[in-house]
Image: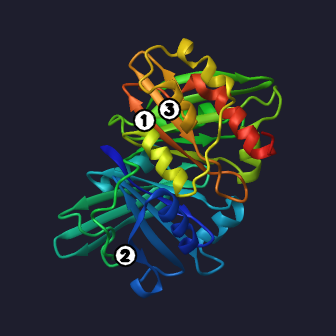
Amino acid sequence: MNLSGIDHIELYVGDARQAAFYYCTAFGFQIVAQGGQETGLKGRRSLLLAQGDIRMVLTSPLVADDPAAEFVRSHGDGVAVIALEVDDAEGAYEELVRRGATAVSAPARYADGEVAVTTAEVTGFGDVTHRLVQRTGPRTEFLPGVFRMSDVDPAAPDLLKVIDHFAVCVPAGELDTVVRHYQEVFGFSQIFEEYIEVGAQGMASKVVQSPSKLITLTLIEPDTSRERGQIDDFLQWHGGPGVQHIAFTTDGISATVGALAERGVRFGSPPPAYYDALAERVTDLAVPVDELRHANVLVDRDHWGQLLQIFTESMHVRRTLFLEIIERRGALTFGSGNIRALYEAKNRELTGVA
């Protein structure tokens, strides 16, 4: 069973066209395909967005009993499917179910000439499922017969490159259970863990990663013996476990942040004192501190290099899902040294306090 990478993600949203307008206008995605009743996608409408190596499907229910409708009622707009690329979808599906995954959708094949795609689905965490995707032949179609491909602008610049990781919030007491699920069922390894204190708040985090190193989940649970914090808020507002943020990579974070800000993207801002002490905490900065301060970019260092990151404000009424823009200059970890600055920035966003 070779889980070789992320094929695509699918968000269930209240209005796919409105969400697509936001992601295209603000983040530079393009609509590259669409599906609905007219293409045999019953009960829903979907738009496929793309940029770099990122493929993101936005799906809205058209009928009240569609599973996407229940997801949106329970969680609001959010990540519902993390699709994994495999060599053999049917074989991977059978193996995952044998190991303890719950079956969601049996293998189905879609073909048009030399292009063939086989998919199957199993449970992941909470109401998020994993779609197993096997592609053969030319990759000119996303899902033959179900999505109608569109013309795109080949000259459009790619601000974002790939999905680096997902940050997932789980209820207190469930972190180890979810970690074991990914280890025993999916064959992931735990590559990192830490306990994080921010003032009177606390949380535990563990990171699991596929053998290919291209599928990474940062799992977080709140410490309910401490003061209530943002992880507790996410779990309440989202209605249970789910993806708190998606991290997208970029090659030049300062320029990317500037371009996104011009498009209307709003970012969290760390306290001014963060940059006063940055040069002492991270020596030999990869980007001048004045440039980082101007862009509100955070920096951390591990044994392998530096990590530059920034977080958007949430674009949803529930204040749940947001995005991370990340540039890795050798670093392999996830910015532990920036947790306090992130929390302070999110607190200002949620409370409106400057």
Q: Give the residue at x 31% y 53%.
A: 91
Q: Are marks 2 and 3 in contact (CB under 8 Å)?
A: no
How far apart in space, not on screen, are marks 1 and 3 (Cα)? 15 Å
Between discs 2 and 3, the one toward the N terminus: 2
First-in-chain label (2 vs 1): 2
First in residue order: circle 1 vs circle 3 = 3
Per the image, label 2 sits on a secondary structure element best described as: loop
For label 1, count other residues whose C-alpha is less than 10 Å away and answer few (under 14), some (14-19) or many (20+).
many
Residue labelled with disc 3 = 291
- Type of the residue with mark 1: Glu
Q: Are marks 2 and 1 in contact (CB under 8 Å)?
A: no
Residue 68, compared with residue 322, is above or below; it is: below
Q: Can you identify the residue that label 1 sits on?
A: 327
User: In the displayed structure, would residue 279 be above or below residue 168?
Assistant: above
Percent position of residue 6, x then y? 38, 49
Q: Residue 227 lies in what quarter of the image?
A: top right
For residue 220, side relative to residue 200 (left or right): left
Front position in the image: 97 or 37: 37
The kind of secondary structure element at disc 3 is: helix
Which residue, given by chain and number where applicable, does mark 2 sit on? 147
Q: Is residue 204 visible?
A: no
- The quadrant holding residue 225 is top right
Residue lying furthest bottom in this view? 38
Where's residue 266, x and y in %? 62, 50
Of badges 2 and 3, nearer the viewer stands: 3
Mark toward the viewer: 2 or 1: 1
Q: In 3D space, how far apart are the residues under numbered discs 2 and 3 (Cα atoms)?
A: 43 Å
